[in-house]
Image: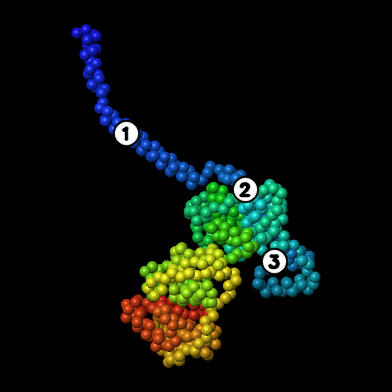
Amino acid sequence: MTIQQAQHARQPHRARALAIPQDNAGSAYRRTIATLIAAMLALATVMGAMQARAQSAPPATFADLVDQVGDAVVNITTSAVVAGRQGGPGPMVPEGSPLEDFFNDFLDRGNPERPPRRSQALGSGFVISEDGYIVTNNHVIEGADEVLIEFREGFTLEAEIIGTDPNTDIALLKVEADSALPFVPFGDSSAMRVGDWVMAMGNPLGQGFSVSVGIVSASGRALSGTYDDYIQTDAAINRGNSGGPLFNLAGEVIGVNTAILSPTGGSIGIGFAMSSDVVTNVVDQLREFGETRRGWLGVRIQDVTEELAEGLGLEQARGALVTDVPEGPALDGGIEVGDVILSFDGQDIEDTRGLVRIVGDSAEGDTVRVVVFRDGGTETLRVTLGRRETAEGLGATTPDGAPVPTPSAEVLGMELVPLTDELRQQLGAQGVANGLVIETVDPASDAAAKGLLPGDIITEVAQQPVSSVADFGARVRAASDAGQKSVLLLIRRAGNPRFVALSLEE
């Protein structure tokens, strides 16, 4: 066989080896494409995870962030006229000491004319709009008759106080500038997690523009205010930092530096910044009205404990238990003493603090749906809110009435007597119509363990009014017969109502 014949003989074999049926070729192609797509998706997932980790990780330097937001952070100097003494400072004596009065009297005799002097204080703030609105703490500018704003670029402007809110320690100022000012936006403080990086800026100890960094140590902290929602941070915050911003890594303000916890007066790594979620609402109202206009529901409330939940028939210990309903929006809307507020304007209520915050963030005149637990079921009520600032100081206005006298007796470790006019006068309970007064409490009883005291007035038992010891006994027996482990009492002490669940088990 010639070479040519051999090659020709091998050609059909090669053709057979390379020939692939068309349907198999299509399947292989589709498998290849699917594999490539899967690989690309996996790569995208990995890249996304790497990007997320990169964003959450601390940068190699914070200098770029400082350059981005630094020009919007300002130093604040305030001054006010205060009484002063001639001849320099007086002796240093402990405040409240008997020597303080002695030296004050001595200096007053030596200097009958004590001319006023001008006192200065320092703080921080930040610009939130190009037309010159500035946020700071109320305590930074409180009582000041002059407020000067020093910008990082070196110029100083006098500020006007637009409005203040002592409840959250926030103040809004305004300056007039010849050109647009650099400003910083607010961020979402609720998105911050414990462990996230933050950066604080301000004027610590009057040293001028300064930066410190740290992490979110805790969130949702309450100090002493009704609307507290503080972010705790270990970023260094000192005197003079008050009113300055706390930034996230995106350059957004997520808190206003307000307070520190320190035995020395200096930073020990426990600082607090009012969350931006609270501040933005306050600032919007100060900007629009020059004052806050918070919603007012008009109830007195307490948290629901496990025992109270059992006494009320609630499956879960949550919500806000209504202890008093004075004249106001809640009374007009049908809310009653003993109701447990479970939802307000579509938001679930976990405790009293949550309800106060949500109501305070609502606007005066809003009509909201309030879901309450009552008599073993839920009811939806519609309440038109009033204004808290107008209602401050209002109390309950329950009409007077006369109780039906009954003999005293001991129930659940308490010696009880009906509320008479004489007792009503002695206890300052002119607004309480009916009830039972606790005369003595057995120290070994559950009542003593729950803190009940002689002089407390029991107005309800098992959410029903009582005016006699017989009423009390009947409510207790009914609760026991129903298999309840505790019975719910509504008591008043010094005009303040609260619920207490007493155990029925011996």
The residue nearer to you, when weighing 329 against 421, is 329
Front residue of 368/177: it is: 368
In front: mark 2 or mark 3? 2
Residue at left 22%, top 18%?
A: 13
First along the sequence among labels 3 and 1: 1
| Kind of residue at disc 2 | Gly
User: Is residue 336 positioned above or below 29 on the image?
Assistant: below
In the image, residue 439 above or below residue 126: below
Q: Which residue is mark 2?
A: 70
Q: Is residue 34 left or right of residue 121?
A: left
Give the CA distance from mark 2 to mark 3: 40 Å
Residue 123 horizontal/vertical position (percent): 65, 57
Q: CA distance from mark 3 to mark 1?
A: 89 Å
Quarter occupied by the N terminus: top left
Residue 360 placement, left or right of 50: right
Q: Is residue 246 above or below residue 305?
A: above
User: Which residue is the site of mark 3?
Assistant: 92
Closer to the observer: label 2 or label 1? 1
Camera-nearest label, 3 or 1: 1
Q: Earlier in the sequence, mark 2 or mark 1?
A: 1
Residue identifier under label 1: 30
- Which residue lies at the image location 66% right of the left edge and 52% below the top edge? 131
Question: Which quarter of the figure has residue 501?
Answer: bottom left
Callout 2: SS = helix
Figure disc tally? 3
